[in-house]
Structures are given as C-alpha cells and as structure tokens.
Image (cartoon, rainbow, N blue to C red):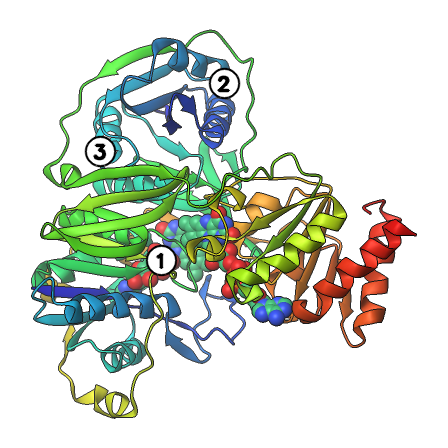
Amino acid sequence: MGGILVYVLHYEGALNKNSLGAVSEAAKLAGELGTTADAIVVGGADLTPELLGTLGDYGASKVYKVEGPEGLAQPVIDAMDKVIGENGHSYVIFGGGLLGFEIGAGLAARRQAGVTMEVTGVVVEGGKLVAERPILGDSQISRSHYQGDLGIIIGRINAFEVKGGQGGAAEIVDTAVEFSPWSTQASMVQRGEQRGADVNIEDANVLVAGGRGLGKAEGFQLCEDLAGVLGGAVAATRAVVDAGWYPYAAQIGQTGKSVAPKLYLAAGISGAIQHKVGMQASENIVAINKDANAPIFEFSDLGIVGDLNKILPKLTEAVKAKKGG
Amino acid sequence: MKICVLVKEVPDAAVEKRIDPSTGRMDRSGEKNLNPYDTHAIEAAMQLKEGGALQIDEVVAVTMGPETAVRALHKAVSLGADRSLHLSDDALAGSDVAATGYALAKALEKEQPDIVLLGQQSDDGECYTIGAVVADHLRAPSLTQVIKLDVVDGGLRCERQAEYGYDTVQVGLPAVISVGDAINEPRYPSLKAIMGAKKKPLEKAAAGDVGIDTSLVGADGSRVQCGEFKAPPAKSAGTIIEDEDTDATVEQIVAWLDERKLI
Ligand SMILES: Cc1cc2nc3c(=O)[nH]c(=O)nc-3n(C[C@H](O)[C@H](O)[C@H](O)COP(=O)(O)OP(=O)(O)OC[C@H]3O[C@@H](n4cnc5c(N)ncnc54)[C@H](O)[C@@H]3O)c2cc1C
Ligand SMILES: Cc1cc2nc3c(=O)[nH]c(=O)nc-3n(C[C@H](O)[C@H](O)[C@H](O)COP(=O)(O)OP(=O)(O)OC[C@H]3O[C@@H](n4cnc5c(N)ncnc54)[C@H](O)[C@@H]3O)c2cc1C
C-alpha cells in the first residue's frame, strides 16, 4: 500500500481551508490503512518553510514543494504525476473548489486512474478506500470502488473537517519538475480579481440572499430593504455575480464564501449543489421560489412557493411593523 | 481552422432522473434532449466563427453515445454546426469519466481541431471534468468554467471564476475549453435549420475506426465503479406555504421568524 497524496492550494501566503480539511482526512485514512499522508504544493516565494511546516500539524508527513506557476491545473498535474511515479502513492485527495476538479481529472487521464468528484465521505473497506458521492440532487449516494494502482478523490467543499494539533513540522522535500509543453501554453494574466464592492457578509447573523429570480440587478434592492430591517447583510449566487448584478465578495458557495448565519433567507435561488454547500450549515433556512419543484425546498426549514416581487416588499413592511410595535 | 464541440444527450429536464436498479446506470428510457449546458458551447463556437478574428472554416459536433444520441447531433447542427461525428460502440457503454474522455480524445485526434469546446457539466452525470481528461490526452492546454472568451494574439483570452475571484488566462492553440453557462445566451434554431439538420453530413465511427484500445473503455475498462447505491441520511421535511393571499403568507412568515427569535 502506497501513501495518500493531497494537493494543497494556496493564495497569497495562506493555505486553503478545504485543502487543510483534505490533509486532515488523508491523515486519518492513512492511519487506518497503515500508511502515510503527504502533501504537494506548487508555487513561488510565498511558500516558506515555516508555512509548509505547519502542514505537519494537520497530519502530513512529507510536503513536496514544487516551484511553478500558480492558479493553473496543468503544471500541478505534471508535478503530481512525477511525485506519484517516484513514490508510489495509491490515492490522491483534493479538497474541492475548482482547480481540484481539473487537476484530479487530468491526473486520472495521465495515470489511467479512476476519479470520483463531489465526495462527502471516504471509508476504508478491505484495506481499500471507498468514496461516497451524493448524486442526482443529493437524492442518493453512489459508492465508488477503485481498480488499478491509483484512486483519485475530489471532495466537496466543507466535506472534510480541518483537524490541527496532529504532529510536529512536516518534512519539506524540494522537487524539481519539468513541465509539459502544453502546460506552459496557458499563462495567468490576472488572478483573484474581486469584481464589485468589498462587502462583508461573514459576520452577519442574518443573510438575505438573492439569485437569478430577482430578474435584474435592481431586483437586489428588495433584498437590501429586507436585510436592512432584519439587521442583516445581502448575499448572492454565482449566476448573478457572473452577470454583474452583485459583488463577488457577497457570493456564497463552492467558489465563493461558506457561511452559517442564524437565518439564511433565499429569494429567487434554485438551490444548486454548488450554492447549497456554502450555506447548508445555516441554523434556519427560508426559501422563496415560484417553482414548487425547486431543489432549494429540499433543504429549507420554511419554504414559500410564490413570487418574490409580491412577497419581499410586504415582508419588509411586516417585519418593520413588528419591530416598531 | 476547425472547432469541435462535444455534445451529449441527457434525460430531458422535465423527466425525473433515476438510477435503474437492475443495471446501476442512469435510466435513459424517458424523453431525452441535448444537454442544455452544451448549447452554450455551440453558441460560443458560432460566435467565434462569426466574429472573424480567427478564420473558422468548420464547426463539428461530436458525441459518444448509443444510437439515440444522434438526436443530440441533429440539435447541434440545427444550432449551427456544419457537420457531426457520432462515436458509437457497445464496447463504450458504461465508461467512467476517464474512459469517456479517452474515447472522445481518440475521436478528436482524427479531426485535429484547433479548438475543442465543451459544456460546463452534463445534466445527468454532473462530473464537470470531461474537458480536463480530453485535454491531457490531446496534450493541449485547458480551462473549465470559462465565461468570457476573446481572441487575443492568435490565442484565447479566457475569464472564469475560481476559488479566490476571477482569473484571466491566456491560452495558446490548440486548446480545450469548457464554457460556463454565463458565457452567452444561446440562440434558438430557426425552423429552416431544424428542417435542414438531417441533411448535414453525419459520420459514424466505431471504437476501432478511431483507434480506441477497447481494454481501456466500457464498464470493464473503467477504473472506478460507481454502481453501488445507498440512501442519504433522512432529514425532516420543512414547512411549505403556497402563497395564495400574500398578506396571510407574510403574517405566517413573520410568526415563524418571531417564534425562533429571528426578528
Ligand atoms: C464549478 C462550479 C462552481 C460553482 N460555484 C458556485 C458558487 O460558489 N455559488 C453559487 O451560487 N453557484 C455556483 N455555481 C453555479 C450553480 O451551479 C448554479 O448555476 C447557481 O447557483 C444558480 O444560481 P441561481 O439560483 O441564482 O439561478 P437559477 O438556478 O437560474 O435559479 C433561479 C430561481 O429563481 C426562481 N424564480 C424566478 N423568478 C422568480 C420570482 N419572480 N419569484 C420567486 N422565484 C423566482 C426560479 O424558479 C429558479 O429556481 C457553480 C457551478 C459550478 C459548475
Ligand atoms: C449520477 C452519476 C454519477 C457519476 N459519477 C461518476 C464518478 O464519480 N466518476 C466517474 O468517473 N464517472 C461517473 N459517472 C459516469 C460519467 O457521468 C460518465 O462517464 C459520462 O460519460 C461522463 O461524465 P459527465 O457526462 O458527467 O461529464 P461532464 O464532465 O459533466 O460533462 C462536461 C461536458 O463534457 C462533454 N461530454 C460529456 N459526455 C460526453 C459524451 N458522451 N459525448 C460528447 N461529449 C460529452 C459535454 O460537452 C459536457 O457538457 C457518473 C454517472 C452518473 C449518471
């Protein structure tokens, strides 16, 4: 049995939380399998020995450090291919997000491996890993069994708990990688552009979130009015952020923020998995959607089937009256 | 130059998707349609062709799937593709992502496209990853979830949202790009285009015709077996209110919130 290798994403000198969750999960599984968990990072000067050493705290034995471009998948595929080829890892785990999908799938192609994405649980059975993936709108769970020398697991964000305090500093192994010609055919022009205002939603107890159902950018006024009287902030889906209706800083989900307010009120949001993963930990979820079959009703505590244009203004008035009275 | 667009036939959005317990695979007996996400890829191809910054001579729709999948190709050509290629072989049935991507790459090798476009996800398998697999086999640079595509310096300038905000990436050709659904508003096919779709050239290929090693595809060649299912943990259903009288509805919402001390 070879070890488990985890790709650790970082940005501006900070390690990604979902990657740390994946390292923690890998360390736990490696313990059960009787092997070790290692990490691999690809980047530049902000990957200091101090920063990388901290990965030992989450259970990583070795950290393979590769100098290379950041934010692109294909150089990481080259790096992981080399490290696995030389060290014989049996499994690879990613924390989720976006790059993990691209790297994991490309690596599966490169090393003829099986890959499972959106994984929410991994168990050891008969000395092998079995990955569990919710499918068809989370109505069923599919269990993946791997064949061959390598199994690739791409987690859902927030699926793996971050567990520190597991050990001392990890051993850092500097690794030189010659990148494939096609890996160098893509180059980052600008990374991490924050479109729209820098709003703070993470500290809010109440979030009123708006989606494509608001109809247009101006529709967000309805959410802002309600958030105002509830003493909360406004959040958004990727669909409306991509459309330029609301700032990226307010986006909840797989490539946005993860939140857990006391109240999450979703208006005109379908409840796609990528949105759900960022808000399902909220204490109370209320959804307003005109489509009775919208997936969001599957995980709402209170669901209102109706037109938000009719409901939101009256709700704002009623809350205001309640508070005043 | 040539663009190949990868398209897939999926169960219609109105059909409840389910796994056939006897085969452990998607039940594909109901109404089917072109994967809606793929219409954005076809539209992106048409805009590149019509934009003129690159001399695009041909847009080719490519699918891998059973006999019926030809309807996805008809739809694709009615949306503007010039011809299509249908990779179909019993040996391919039950392929996982890695095997599907390998088989599609083999078919593409024969076409030698300058640009390969895909949808962001299929509406049934939702694996998001075929593009990355195809790209590694074709040894081409690749990005997924691209929502803006411009021709710059003879290559593609791509924008997409990633973990830390929006990234802009310059990609040389040939390239494999999966487009996000925010990239464009796909056009509707004209009646004339729908009528003419079956007249556009359609080529069929079996695994052997494009040099696929059949030991690497199909259920047996797949390295991941996803045919075992279990129910998710049961959760208590929430309260549902149908809004008929909005004043009454709002009163109920306020009472619900007040009970939980959320106001
Ligand atoms: C890799 C990847 C990452 C992603 N990351 C994220 C992410 O971080 N966050 C995120 O949110 N999404 C993300 N997505 C996108 C996600 O899959 C969905 O496309 C998105 O969440 C949909 O946004 P929406 O609910 O606003 O729009 P839609 O899905 O279009 O839903 C609009 C809803 O509004 C309802 N509606 C319309 N009019 C009214 C009305 N008048 N009154 C009441 N209801 C109405 C409709 O019934 C519908 O349910 C990601 C996708 C991928 C592939
Ligand atoms: C519920 C479910 C769960 C699954 N889970 C897994 C899993 O965890 N791991 C795994 O390896 N396999 C899995 N599969 C199998 C996988 O869906 C198939 O291998 C499928 O052929 C490719 O994946 P996708 O359609 O989900 O692709 P996606 O990556 O979601 O599709 C993206 C794009 O690729 C193109 N494309 C996809 N398929 C074709 C095709 N046949 N012909 C032409 N273009 C195409 C389209 O442009 C599409 O928009 C699962 C299948 C189902 C039904």
Q: Nearer the viewer, mark 2 or mark 3?
A: 3
- State yes or no: discs 1 and 2 in contact (Cβ < 8 Å): no
Q: Which of B205 and A206 is in front in this view?
A: A206
Q: Is mark 2 on a helix, strand or loop?
A: helix
Q: Residue furthest right?
A: A325
Label 1 chain ID: B
Q: Does the residue labelled 2 lie within 8 Å of ligand 1?
A: no
Q: Which amino acid does label 2 sit on?
A: Tyr
- Bin the neighbour count of mark 1 within 10 Å (Cα to Cα): few under 14, some 14-19, many 20 and up: many
Determine which of the numbered discs, if any, sits on residue A58 in the image: 2
The picture quadrant where one finds residue A177 is: top left
Q: Mark 1 points at which residue?
A: B180
Q: Is mark 3 on a helix, strand or loop?
A: helix
Q: What residue type is labelled 1?
A: Gly
Chain-order first, disc 2 or disc 3: 2
Q: Does the residue labelled 1 lie within 8 Å of ligand 1?
A: yes
Residue located 46% across and 23% down the image? A30
Q: Mark 3 points at which residue?
A: A75
Instruction: Determine whether, in the image, residue A240 is placed left or right of residue B239.
Output: left
From the viewer's perspective, is residue B56 above or below residue B259?
below
The picture quadrant where one finds residue B67 is: bottom left
- Bin the neighbour count of mark 3 within 10 Å (Cα to Cα): few under 14, some 14-19, many 20 and up: many
Q: How far apart are marks 2 and 3 (CA)?
A: 25 Å
Q: Nearer the viewer, mark 1 or mark 3?
A: 1
